Image: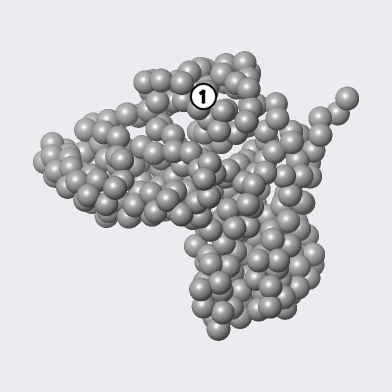
Amino acid sequence: MEPASCAPESSPILVGGTGRSGSTVVGHILDHHPQLSLTRPMEVRFIAGRHGLAEALDTAQRHPDQAAAVSELAVDRLKNRWYFRAEEVGLHTTVARPDLDTWCADYCGGFGTDPVGATRQLTAQIMQRVVAPLPGSQWVDTTPANARNADLVTRIYPNGRVIAVERDGRDVAASFVQQPFGPDDPFQALRKWEQRTLRIHQAAKACPPDRMLIVQLMDLVAKDRAGALQRICEFLGLAVDAEMVAWCDDNVTADAAHPDRWRRQFDRKTADRLDKRYAEAVQRLRAQGVQVVT
């Protein structure tokens, strides 16, 4: 019997983090569960990303007079940023441009009077094409902004579940500066980590009960792998699968995760300054109720 295809209206699993925190790793782990499939592209971006549909919906609900402007901005980002990202990466791999143009026109036309309905309709139309070829009964997206906008994306998917992956901010900063995107200064990167960590905490507080789970990357890597996988699967209402565990054991290693890379990557003076700034950031976050694991 052929496996059931994912349905766009099914309860999606939206994985995110601060960026460079391990959300991609968790997405690949979940992709090896027989009931789940990672989207292609694995970061659809247009829902939770900056100026995406979730942000437009939030703004329109708070400021109805801005509905036209934010819906047009969301469509511009969708068409000109997230549709084609690279030759094999983007919504263009599954969604025909004429269809997208029609759907976006309908979205903008209906957004002013029914922003929730228009947003859900456009999201479902796009995701139906994205997930149609995928096996499993639920789809998984790993757009990093899913975590910090969890309270917004659950307005689009009331039955969706969000997993936020957390990682030591010093390692996040060290990873960011090695990438062609994001801050190339470790102290700016650490500040971004702090801001996004606070936003994830605020989103978790604003989410409906039992819709968001926070996972520590290092638990999956070394500290409590079995426990972390069990918590993830229980949160999703799934049994732990042997294939998923085997893939995790083979691929999620300490070497691949680069723990404490900030100590090795920077000279002693820079590492000491980063450590001090990190301690100050943790203190500020904890003063605002964020449970930072160090």
The location of residue 272, given as percent across then percent down, is 13, 39
Where does residue 259 sit, x and y in percent of width and height? Answer: 32, 29
Residue at position x 52%, y 17% in the image? 250
Q: Quadrant where the C terminus lies?
A: top left
Apparent side of residue 171 relative to residue 22 in the rendered image (left or right): left
Q: Residues within 10 Å of mark 1 (few under 14, many from 20)?
A: many
Depth check: 104 or 40 in front? Answer: 104
Residue at image coords 70%, 26% = 34
Q: Is residue 174 left or right of residue 124?
A: left
Give the camera-side residue of 134 and 70. 70
Q: Residue at x 41, y 42 (%)?
A: 20
Q: How many marks?
A: 1
Mark 1 element type: helix
In this rendering, would 281 be left or right of 272? right
Which residue is identified by label 1? 229
Callout 1 amino acid: Leu
Residue 223 pos. (x, y %)? 37, 20
Q: Which of the two residues, 48 or 80, is positioned nearer the viewer here?
A: 48
* Color style of the picture: one colour
Residue 177 seen by the camera: no
Pick out the residue farthest to the front.
209
Q: Residue furthest bottom?
A: 65
- The residue lying toward the viewer, choosing from 235 and 46, is 235
Q: Quadrant of the N terminus?
A: top right
Task: Measuring from the top left, give residue 246's x and y in whole percent.
Answer: 57, 16
Q: Residue at x 59, y 58 (%)?
A: 155
Query: Where 294 sits versus 11, above or below?
Result: above
156 is higher (above) or lower (below) than 20: below
Q: Is residue 70 left or right of residue 286?
A: right
The relative height of residue 34 versus residue 162 in the rendered view (above or below) is: above
